[in-house]
Amino acid sequence: MASEQHIAIASDADIVVARQATRALTVELGFSSSDQAGVATAVSEIARNIVEYAQSGEIVIRVALNGGHRGIVVVARDTGPGIDDVEIAMGDGYTTGRGLGLGLPGARRLMDEFDIVSKVGKGTTVTMKKWVR
Amino acid sequence: MQVPILKQRHYLIASIQGALTDADLLRLCDDLLEQVGKFRSQGVVIDVTVLDVMDSFATRTLRSISQMLKLRGAGTVIVGIQPDVAFAMIQLGLRLEGAVTALDLEEGIAFLDKGKKEGQRTWPVSST
């Protein structure tokens, strides 16, 4: 199992690469099929946010270990415009783009842990985890 | 990956073969709009059985396709959404509301046949 995979995100084709790599790792880790779909969907949403708002960035996926628990860590980083008010951006239906405004709050619902750090003019980093049940 | 569109009687069947990029989905939309006119099709079935992820973009595009095709006089049925995909879509907060769904291709065709027999032209596509 590769310890860490970096996937450069700059186009819609990269979104597909990111979710396929995620799916493969969740299969390897033994996630249930519905959690596999959930994690891949969450990655698809945050990868799309990178393409839409920051134009480019990267997604890093790796295995998470916590005692006897195994899981997946997904880190999405960009150096885009950043988010002015993270709390508002985490609300359902809020969007400044073309989407439905479900990306961030939806990804949070699909994952077990979700953290977002954003600085206007500097970029955004989303870190999310899901544990194998 | 381009989605092949087959003509079967009065219907078009778009059978997705693998993972689609956003651009592929938009092309599917253009292709269906064009071919529905060209073949005077009365219904379209979009088979998404192989998709293991339907994110917000895919959902929104399929919903738009179904609404646009309605304006062209054709009903659309989306078939084959997998149970795990349905689960993830609902958790994400996605709704395909407005679009007709059916279990598989057979059920999808049966739905279109029923609408045709009854002379139904008011496909249940809502405004959302």
Image: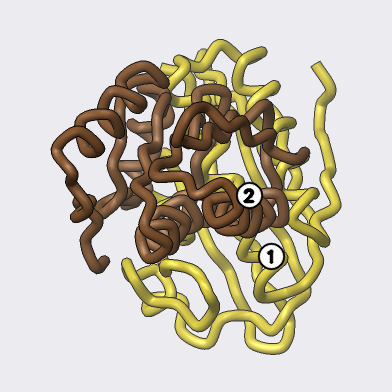
**In which image quadrant can residue B105 be found?**
top left
Q: Residue at x 61, y 65 (%)?
A: A49
Q: Is residue A127 visible?
A: no
Return the residue found at the far left. Answer: B118
Residue A20 is labelled as: none
Quadrant assignment for the N terminus of chain B? top right
Residue B28 is labelled as: 2
Quadrant assignment for the C terminus of chain B? bottom left
Q: Residue at x 60, y 53 (%)?
A: B38
The letter of the yellow chain is A
Left or right of B85, for residue B26:
right
Along the line of sight, the residue nearer the viewer: B43 or A78: B43
Mark nearer the viewer, 2 or 1: 2
Mark 1 element type = helix
Mark 2 element type = helix
Q: Position of residue A123 (x, y in %)?
A: 70, 76
Q: Is disc 1 surrounded by few (<14), some (14 to 19) or many (20+) residues within 10 Å?
A: many
Q: Chain B rendered in what hue? A: brown
Left or right of B83, for residue A24:
right
Q: Residue at x 35, y 32 (%)?
A: B86
Q: Is residue A5 above or below residue A107?
A: above
**In which image quadrant can residue A52 be found?**
bottom right
Can you identify the residue that label 1 sits on? A50
User: Label 1 near label 2: C-beta < 8 Å?
Assistant: no
Along the line of sight, the residue nearer the viewer: A108 or A37: A37
Chain letter for mark 1: A
Left or right of B72, for residue A79:
right
Q: Is residue A9 visible?
A: yes
